Image: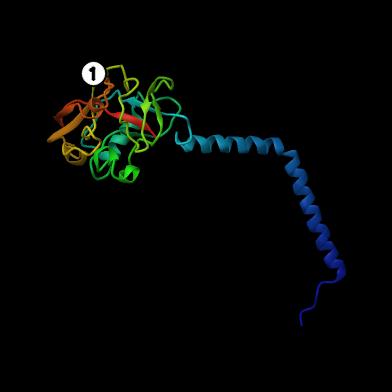
Amino acid sequence: MKSLPSKSVLGFQVVSIFLSVMVSVVSCSKSKDNNDTVIGTMLVALNANSGCANKDHCKMFVIKANAILNAGISGLDSQCNSDENKPSGGGNYKAMVADGTNRVACTSANCATASTSEHIDWILKPNKEYRRDDGSTVIGYTTKNGIFESDLTNEISSVINGTNLTITGLNANWTNSSNDCSNFSTTVGNVAIGSHIEKTITSVIAFGSAVCSSTRKLICVEQ
């Protein structure tokens, strides 16, 4: 049978544990200000990484460079995040385009059938206010389906960077257009385009079509 520790040993262990706890308490008390600073920094970082989901608005902007249409959805997103016009303050942005496979806004007209469950990697949030890159000019408000149905309050951008046309790959009812440069993998064929200086939503996303080799811009949306 294994012998139990003596009373003196047990007493020593209890005292040791007590002293360790007291040292920890004193240490925590002395470093409270430092701890508060560290916690505050962590909360700021956490809020920054959460994007605009918990903010009162998200931002949109139009890239300064010309869109590279054969870069795929991920390549278009990368252009948004590396462009000179990206708003200060960081954040992650994605291109307001659809290809029917990797990014889908609606599979039924205006997502009337199944609302946001029709989305695939969609970039607009439901019931959200969107503003220009200046952070104050309101562009418009999305519906519960995560799209703009009413005309915009203001144009996405009033500045023309070489062209006022942007690629979208969308029909006027937010379903995917067959004109999407073969899922944005080639410069051969046609692409559905919109206009960033329009307020009528059908013109913003489905102004017409152009050849995939043409010079066009991207609308980028904060996530």
Q: Amino acid at mark 1?
A: Gly
Judge from the rendering whether residue 83 lies leftward or rightward of residue 170; answer left or right: right
Quarter of the N terminus within the rendering: bottom right
Front-most of residues 156 and 32: 156
Residue 78: percent from the left, percent from the top? 32, 35
User: Where residue 95 sits in the image (x, y, percent)?
Assistant: 31, 33
How many numbered discs, if any? 1
In the picture of the structure, the residue carrying the numbered disc 1 is: 162
**According to the image, what is the colour scheme of the structure?**
rainbow
Kindly give the residue lying farthest to the front in the view shown.
112
Residue 105 visible in the snapshot: no
Foreground residue among 158 and 30: 158
Q: Nearer the viewer, residue 223 or 84?
A: 223
Q: Where residue 103 sits: x, y (%)?
A: 28, 42
Residue found at x 33% / y 42%: 115
Q: Secondary structure at mark 1?
A: loop
Depicted 15 relative to depicted 79: above or below: below
In the rendered image, which quarter is residue 61 located in?
top left
Quadrant of the drawing holding the C terminus: top left
Task: Answer with left or right where residue 92 lies relative to residue 214.
Answer: right
